[in-house]
């Protein structure tokens, strides 16, 4: 599944369009970036309401396919600038994380198996 | 130069989670008993009890620096320390504007008391203080720095409300002088107990250079400081990665919410008990130094 399919199905806004043809390997949701660094896998779509510039650094470091920022949180200018530079797909929605994760699961996007 | 034991992170009865014993005269009495020369008052998002503690300490030789513990919009706790009440009041206006208008739920969180120097009740703060402001960590650090204060990410070893847990690593270019860890961060099993003993007679500086915490010096000094490295490793598995190439001074504060938790874990060598001198001590500049003392048990 490509990021573009998720954008269409969940009617997400595209804050930074780096490459929506990226393959989605699964999903991860947390607002604690230390947990994301330990728990998310390459190609995952990450659902969070955190929009600090470090979000982009973590997404880039882990080569995540996209970040979905929930509850209409507006990323700082610095975050958007960094997303553009690091070519990170930044997506947005008014829905909360619970709802977005439920809809992703409905699309067949799965979480990572523990261990 | 003075050698001062410091504890920059103390809560008073204004913090809902603090015990009612955290009133100015008892905080001052306990600080003096511990041999502390300088304390910082850091209630959640509010400095309303700072003046009372300063007054309670008058004539005792104990320096009380006004401050608060601000919660950023990323839920990161940041220690904000100033020299004067005027500075902290200016900072309070910024924080007040950034604090949501939510009522405190005393039955759930506890009461938030504003008291006088004797500890007598003046009024009860009705706003919920221990919640996130709309300020980013950058806005907090820059705001405090601009006012001449010292901004220090609080208890970075904690799994919640800390810059490392919430943001993964310390953002580059943040104007901070150092980072704070809790006494609990120290893994005593990694050290021989003999190396940990705090000087009984409290004459300072009596320290082991291996416990020095000047991380902002040259990389070589950092690498050579094996004990320090082990110490940091025990603090946070990947702290070297998390802090990137920057070197931050480290201090240990008690973050005490009750008198028994107050402690003397950090000693600074400074020319005066001021924010500017503490900044130099955390950076290890101009002969100012920070030394960490581990629990005596």
Image (tube, coloured by chain):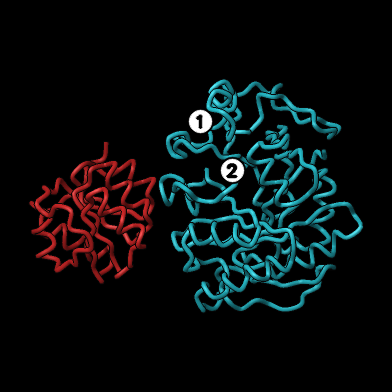
Q: Is residue B34 above or below residue B207?
A: below
Q: Which residue is mark 2?
A: B181
The numbered mark, 2 or 1, whose residue comes first in the sequence reads: 2
User: Label 1 near label 2: C-beta < 8 Å?
Assistant: no
Q: Tell me which chain appears red.
A: A
Whether residue B267 is visible here, answered yes or no, is yes
Mark 2 and mark 1: span between their CA atoms? 12 Å
Q: Position of residue B14 (x, y in %)?
A: 67, 67
> Which image quadrant is residue B18 in?
bottom right
Q: Which residue is found at the position 70% from the left and 72% from the top? A: B113
Pointer 1 residue: B233
Could you tell me which chain the residue with mark 1 belongs to? B
Horizontal relation, residue A32 to residue B213: left or right: left
Q: Residue B261 in the image: state x and y as whole percent.
A: 70, 48
Residue lying at the far front of the rendered structure:
B286
- Would you call the spot at circle 2 few (<14 residues within 10 Å), some (14-19), or many (20 or more)? many
Q: Residue furthest right?
A: B59
Instruction: Please give the name of the residue rendered at 61% of the width and 78% of the height, measured from the top-left corner.
Output: B126
State the residue in front, B64 or B19: B64
Q: As rendered, which of B2 and B101 lies closer to the eye?
A: B2
Q: Which mark is residue A12?
A: none
Q: In the rendered structure, the residue with mark 2 lies on which chain?
A: B
- Decide which of B98, A94 is in the foreground and name it: B98
Picture coordinates of residue A65, whole percent (x, y) = 18, 49
Q: Residues within 10 Å of mark 1 (few under 14, many from 20)?
A: some
Establish if A100 lies above or below A61: below
Q: Which chain is cyan?
A: B
Q: Identify the secondary structure beneath mark 2.
A: strand
């Amino acid at each position: 599944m490509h990021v573009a399919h998720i954008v269409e199905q969940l009617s997400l806004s595209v804050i930074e369009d780096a490459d929506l043809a990226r393959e989605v390997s699964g999903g991860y949701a947390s607002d604690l970036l230390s947990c994301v660094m330990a728990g998310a896998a390459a190609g995952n779509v990450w659902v969070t309401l955190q929009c600090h510039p470090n979000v982009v650094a973590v997404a880039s470091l882990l080569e995540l396919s996209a970040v979905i920022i929930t509850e209409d949180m507006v990323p700082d200018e610095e975050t958007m600038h960094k997303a553009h530079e690091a070519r990170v797909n930044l997506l947005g929605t008014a829905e909360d994380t619970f709802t977005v994760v439920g809809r992703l699961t409905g699309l067949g996007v799965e979480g990572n198996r523990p261990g | 130069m003075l050698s001062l034991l410091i504890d920059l992170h103390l809560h008073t009865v204004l913090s809902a989670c603090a015990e009612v014993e955290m009133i100015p005269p008892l905080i001052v009495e306990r600080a003096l008993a511990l041999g502390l020369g300088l304390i910082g008052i850091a209630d959640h998002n509010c400095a309303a009890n700072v003046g009372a503690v300063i007054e309670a300490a008058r004539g005792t030789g104990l320096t009380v620096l006004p401050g608060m513990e601000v919660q950023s919009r990323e839920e990161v706790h940041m220690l904000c320390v100033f020299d004067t009440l005027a500075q902290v009041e200016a900072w309070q206006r910024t924080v007040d504007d950034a604090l949501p208008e939510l009522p405190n739920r005393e039955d759930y969180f506890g009461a938030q008391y504003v008291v006088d120097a004797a500890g007598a009740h003046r009024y009860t703060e009705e706003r919920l203080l221990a919640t996130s402001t709309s300020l980013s960590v950058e806005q907090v650090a820059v705001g405090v720095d601009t006012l001449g204060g010292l901004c220090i990410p609080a208890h970075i070893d904690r799994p919640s409300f800390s810059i490392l847990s919430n943001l993964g690593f310390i953002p580059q270019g943040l104007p901070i002088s150092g980072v704070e860890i809790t006494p609990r961060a120290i893994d005593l099993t990694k050290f021989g107990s003999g190396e940990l003993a705090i000087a009984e007679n409290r004459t300072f500086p009596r320290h082991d250079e291996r416990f020095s915490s000047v991380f902002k010096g040259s990389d070589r000094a950092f690498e050579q400081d094996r004990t320090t490295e082990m110490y940091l490793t025990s603090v946070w598995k990947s702290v070297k990665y998390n802090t990137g190439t920057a070197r931050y001074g480290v201090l240990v504060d008690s973050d005490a919410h009750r008198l028994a938790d107050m402690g003397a874990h950090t000693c600074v060598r400074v020319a005066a008990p001021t924010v500017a001198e503490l900044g130099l001590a955390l950076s290890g500049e101009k002969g100012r130094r920070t030394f960490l003392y581990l629990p005596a048990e």
